Image (tube, helix red, strand yellow):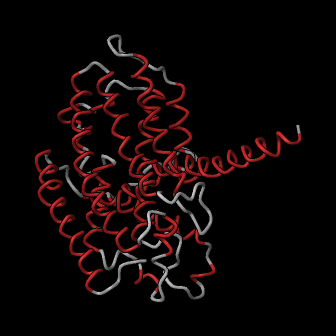
Amino acid sequence: MVEFWDIYGLPTAIIVAKILAIVLPLLIAVAYLTLYERKVMALMQLRKGPNVVGFYGLLQPLADGAKLFFKETIVPSGANKFLFLFAPMLTFILSLIAWAVIPFDEGMVLSDLNVGVLYLFAISSLGVYGIVIAGWASNSRYPFLGALRSAAQMVSYEVSIGFVIITVLLCVGSLNLTDVVKSQDGEYGMFSWYFIPLFPMFIIFFISILAETNRHPFDLPEAEAELVAGYQTEYSSMAFALFFLGEYANMILMSAICVVLFLGGWLPPADIAPFNWIPGVVWFGIKIAILLFVFIWVRATLPRYRYDQLMRLGWKVFLPFSLIWVVLTAGFLIVFDMVPA
């Protein structure tokens, strides 16, 4: 029995504890990101936002969760019941399991894979399946059209995201996300981070993750004017809540990837006091919060794109520009003998 505990029980308990240490704060962050968004948009629009439930509205996410939890789950009579209920679960699960390779601080990562970037790329590519399955299983024209839109949109912008990541990997020489952060730890502090030498790719990456997460101004898969609410039209109760939470969890995940690739991960802006007194995981969270603020800022500011504009931007602007930048970056590294070992 002791041998079983030492070989199987204790390692399993440690892994479960690590998973809970990531998932539970993430779920709380997802819940309060909804409040953060509503408060920030309210300030931008000279409103108060949620301010009734709890002090300054701090209990509003709990009230929203309770409301959705106790509502009746309605499954359309013509829907494929298994796939209809499986789709939101798949979307939510995929938004969580990608965190396995995200380094929060030096040594603070669930699985420090040498191919962590490929793992993230694979998981993000699977995200479209939940939406496509939801649209098809609903057996309704509006969800189906929303699912088709989402599939085309996510595939289009994943190509640009791939070239952006390749550009960063050329500068790093590793697929390990911890190595990506350490390669930005230069003597110039934040001026050594990749968002400065690769600034155009940083902008392309950020705009592409807006499209990848179906956020404004690229939220065409759920455009109310044409598609009522798109792929989630027939969903209610906790099934709808899982889509809702999955979208916000993906926002946090994509912001975290952006921080790791371009903003130095857990590194402070300068390796001097008082910046280096603050733990790395706190700096990581602050950078994610700043990017999430920009997500919300864009939503409160810009009108929705037309679908042809969205596709033109992805295929005729971002794709050729990012491809050219990959070639220029590789050429620069070779000419100046800066290719990482």
Closer to us: 140 or 53 = 140
Please tell me which residue lies in front, 139 or 193. Answer: 193
Picture quarter containing residue 174? Answer: bottom left
Q: Quadrant of the N terminus?
A: top right
Marks counted in the figure total: 0
Residue 29 is situated, as x and y percent measured from the top left of the image, at: 53, 52
Q: Seen from this angle, which residue lies furthest right?
A: 2
Depicted 34 relative to depicted 274: above or below: above
Residue drawn at point x = 78 percent, y = 46 percent: 10
Res. 100 visible in picture:
yes
Observer able to see residue 300: no
The x and y percentages for residue 291 are 40, 63
Give the camera-side residue of 285 and 44.
285
Residue positioned 29% across, 24% down in the render: 136
In the foreground, 60 or 134: 134
Residue shown at 66% from the left, 51% from the top? 18
Q: Is residue 98 left or right of residue 166?
A: right
- x%, y% of residue 114? 50, 60
At 32% across and 11% down in the image, what residue appears?
78
Q: Position of residue 335 (x, y in %)?
A: 25, 84
Decide if residue 4 is on the left or right side of residue 59: right
Quadrant in the picture for the C terminus: bottom left
Placement of 125 over or under 224, stated as above or below: below
